[in-house]
Image (cartoon, helix red, strand yellow):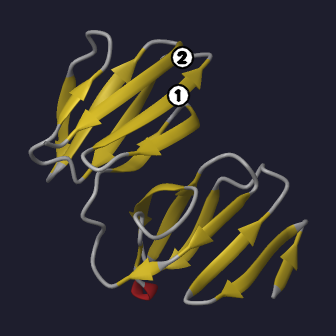
Amino acid sequence: MLDFNRTLIARDGTGWLVRNSGKLRELRITSNLGYPNLVESCNLAGFNDHGGSRYIHMLPGGEARVQLRVAAPPVPYLVSAAGYLESLERGAHDVRLLFKSHTPFSVRLGNISGCSIAEDNHPARKAGANELSVDLAEGKHALAIDCR
């Protein structure tokens, strides 16, 4: 068990329990530990790799359960966002994300091959292999990803 600045990280069965004041939104692990299991975990939105580190994006609320897996997750996920992620809901074939920002911002999503993105006439553009990016104006925006 670790306690840094009121953040508690403890082993929880086959994963990790992360508790904090709600301000911690990123968890960094070394890439060789694996990928977040976005289906079995709780309150995780996605991840992004930089160098030998993997940054796991957590949702608001101050608690997340992190399960890891060997391969990248088979579901759409958040790669990066320059706005604040308020919520994320996963369905059997869809993902809904709610963002807000006081300035224009962009959102990058991964593993969206074969999926469509709906958001108030903001076209998505290819951002890399199996990734799309959406540029959004300031304010609140709901993105709906449909993978049927």
Q: Amino acid at mark 2?
A: Lys
User: For the C terminus, which image quadrant?
Assistant: top left
Q: At 14% from the left edge and 53% from the top edge, which residue is drawn?
A: 129
- Picture coordinates of residue 130 (x, y %)? 16, 51
Whether residue 19 sits left or right of residue 91 in the image: it is: right
> Which label belongs to residue 127?
none
Task: Say which quarter of the image contains residue 111.
Answer: bottom left
Location of residue 66 with respect to 114 vertically, above or below: below
Instruction: Place residue 33 in its image quadrant.
Output: bottom left
Asked if the residue under mark 2 is in contact with the one under mark 1, i.e. CB atoms within 8 Å, the reply is yes
* Residue 127 x %, y %: 21, 41
Q: In terms of depth relative to the viewer, which is nearer, 58 or 29?
A: 58
Q: Residue at x 51, y 64 (%)?
A: 55
Tell me the kind of residue under disc 1.
Phe
Q: Position of residue 24 (x, y in %)?
A: 73, 55
- What secondary structure is marked by label 2? strand
Q: Residue at x 60, y 49 (%)?
A: 59
Instruction: Name the residue at 78% across, 49% down.
Output: 23
In the picture of the structure, the residue carrying the numbered disc 2 is 140
Name the residue tied to disc 1: 99
| Residue closest to the far front | 92
Quadrant of the rendered image containing residue 39: bottom left
Looking at the rendered image, the quarter that the N terminus falls into is: bottom right
Q: Is residue 134 above or below residue 73?
A: above
Q: Earlier in the sequence, mark 1 or mark 2?
A: 1
Mark 1 to mark 2 CA distance (whole Å): 6 Å
Query: Is 27 located above or below residue 134 in the figure?
Result: below
Residue 88 is left or right of residue 75, and the answer is: right
Q: Give whichever of 118, 81 is nearer the camera.
A: 118
Neighbour class for label 2 at 10 Å: few (<14), some, many (≥20)? some
Q: Secondary structure at mark 1?
A: strand
Residue 41 x, y percent position in the rendering: 51, 68
